[in-house]
Image (cartoon, rainbow, N blue to C red):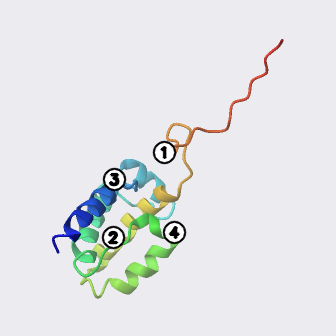
Amino acid sequence: MSRSLPLLALLLALAACAPGVSLVPTEGDVAGVRPAYPDATLAQLEEGHRLYRARCGSCHRPHSPGELAPDAWPDIVADMAERAALSPDQSRAVTRFLVAVSIRAHAPPTPEDPPLGALGPPQLSRTDR
C-alpha cells in the first residue's frame, strides 16, 4: 500500500487539474434552458444541483452533465428518480439542472471564451519587398 500511495496522490492531483464544466448554475444557464422550460429559475437549478450531488452521488459516481447530450437527461432522470426517492418537483429540478449545464457544456465556444490552448486560425500577412 505504501508504494501505491504516491501514485494515488499523483492521480488525484491530476484529476483535480483536469478541465471541466463548472456545475454551479448561472443566470446564463437559466436563459439557455428557458426555450425548453420557460418557467425555469436559478433557484430551481441550484436546488437541482444540490439534489444531484446529494441523491445521485450517494449511490454512484454522478456523471458530469456535459458527458451526455441535453436531450438524454430527461429519460435518465425519469428512470432514476424512484431509486433516488425524488418527488416530482425534485425530479423536475434535477432534470432542468442537468439539461441546463449540458447545454452550456455542448455550446460552441464564443470569441470571448475560446477553449483552452486555442490560438485561433493562423494569421497570415503579406509583406511587400
Q: Residue 129 location, x and y as percent?
A: 84, 11
* Cα gap from disc 2 to disc 4, whole angstroms: 15 Å
Q: Nearer the viewer, residue 6 or 106?
A: 6
Position above or below: 77 against 128: below
Closer to the eye: label 2 or 3:
3
* Cα gap from disc 3 to disc 4, whole angstroms: 24 Å
* Cα gap from disc 2 to disc 3, whole angstroms: 26 Å
Q: Which mark is residue 69?
A: 4
Mark 2 belongs to which amino acid?
Answer: Val
Q: Residue 110 location, x and y as percent?
A: 55, 43
Closer to the eye: label 3 or 4:
3
Q: Which mark is residue 17?
A: 3
* Cα gap from disc 1 to disc 2, whole angstroms: 29 Å
Residue displayed at 25% across by 82% down: 59
* Between discs 1 and 2, the one toward the N terminus: 2
Position above or below: 35 against 82: above
* Cα gap from disc 1 to disc 3, whole angstroms: 13 Å
Quadrant in which the N terminus appears: bottom left
Closer to the eye: label 1 or 2:
1
Closer to the eye: label 2 or 4:
4
Q: Which mark is residue 94?
A: 2
